[in-house]
Image (cartoon, helix red, strand yellow):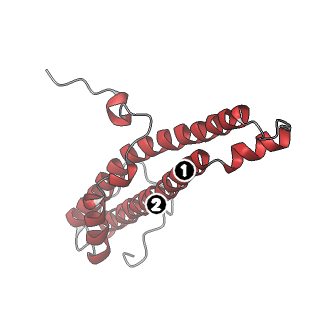
């Protein structure tokens, strides 16, 4: 019997993931390989499609974790600001609402969490861009494979779309 796979296995148990240690080695290898290689035949184009999807699959897991971390850190920033604001008391005993607000916004605790949040958001952007490149690459190789099937192999799918555009270079 196969092992049960749950969504929680992908998202992890921690509210704040150690995102800076996500292993992107395989992703970089796939991206470099896709950059250096041209599809030479149908089987090769299909293999490149699969590699791009494998990289996108890995990134999907990391994106889930980083989105969870960003949400957690945003909540933590707000709660820490509120806590510091509520606890602030002016030295002369005359505490105003503005003073409490400024204390919360200028707290070193809040600044530390905001820096983590900025790193998490930057990491999320990097992961999203790499994911986008991999998905676009997958579709590129899919178009090449479709063009090769039509022109070289004479393959016509059962549901023919009229005047479907053949990828450039494979007319």
- Mark before the other along the chain sequence, 1 or 2: 1
- Give residue 117's position: percent from left, percent from top: 54, 50
Q: Quadrant of residue 78?
A: top right
Q: Secondary structure at mark 2?
A: helix
**Spot occupied by residue 49 in the image (x, y as percentages of width and height):** 30, 59
Instruction: Determine which of the numbered discs, if any, sits on residue 70 in the image.
Output: none
For the point 32% across and 74% down, the residue is 35
Residue placed furthest toward the top:
1
Q: From the viewer's perspective, is 166 left or right of 156?
A: right
Please say whether residue 104 is visible from this viewpoint.
yes
**Crowd tier of the residue under label 1, counting other residues whose Cα lies within 10 Å: few below 14, some 14–19, many 20 or above:** few
Give whichever of 127, 140 is nearer the camera.
Answer: 127
Q: Is residue 46 visible?
A: no
* Mark 2, residue position: 126
| Residue under the image location 32 percent in, 70 percent down | 151
Q: Which residue is mark 1?
A: 112
Residue 162 at x, y = what percent? 51, 58
Residue 4 x/y as whole percent: 24, 23
Instruction: Identify the residue at image location x=38%, y=47%.
Output: 62
């Amino acid at each position: 019997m196969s092992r049960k796979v749950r969504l929680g296995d992908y998202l992890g148990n921690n509210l704040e993931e150690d995102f800076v240690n996500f292993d992107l080695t395989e992703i970089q290898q796939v991206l470099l390989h896709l950059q250096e290689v041209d599809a030479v035949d149908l089987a090769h184009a299909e293999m490149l499609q699969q590699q791009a999807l494998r990289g996108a699959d890995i990134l999907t897991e990391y994106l889930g974790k980083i989105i969870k971390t960003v949400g957690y850190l945003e909540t933590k920033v707000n709660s820490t600001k509120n806590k510091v604001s509520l606890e602030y008391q002016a030295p002369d005993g005359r505490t105003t609402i503005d003073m409490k607000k400024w204390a919360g916004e200028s707290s070193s605790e809040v600044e530390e969490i905001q820096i983590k949040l900025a790193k998490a958001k930057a990491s999320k952007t990097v992961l999203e861009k790499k994911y986008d490149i991999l998905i676009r690459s997958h579709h590129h190789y899919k178009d090449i494979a479709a063009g090769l099937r039509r022109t070289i192999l004479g393959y016509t799918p059962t549901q023919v779309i009229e005047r479907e555009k053949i990828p450039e270079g494979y007319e």
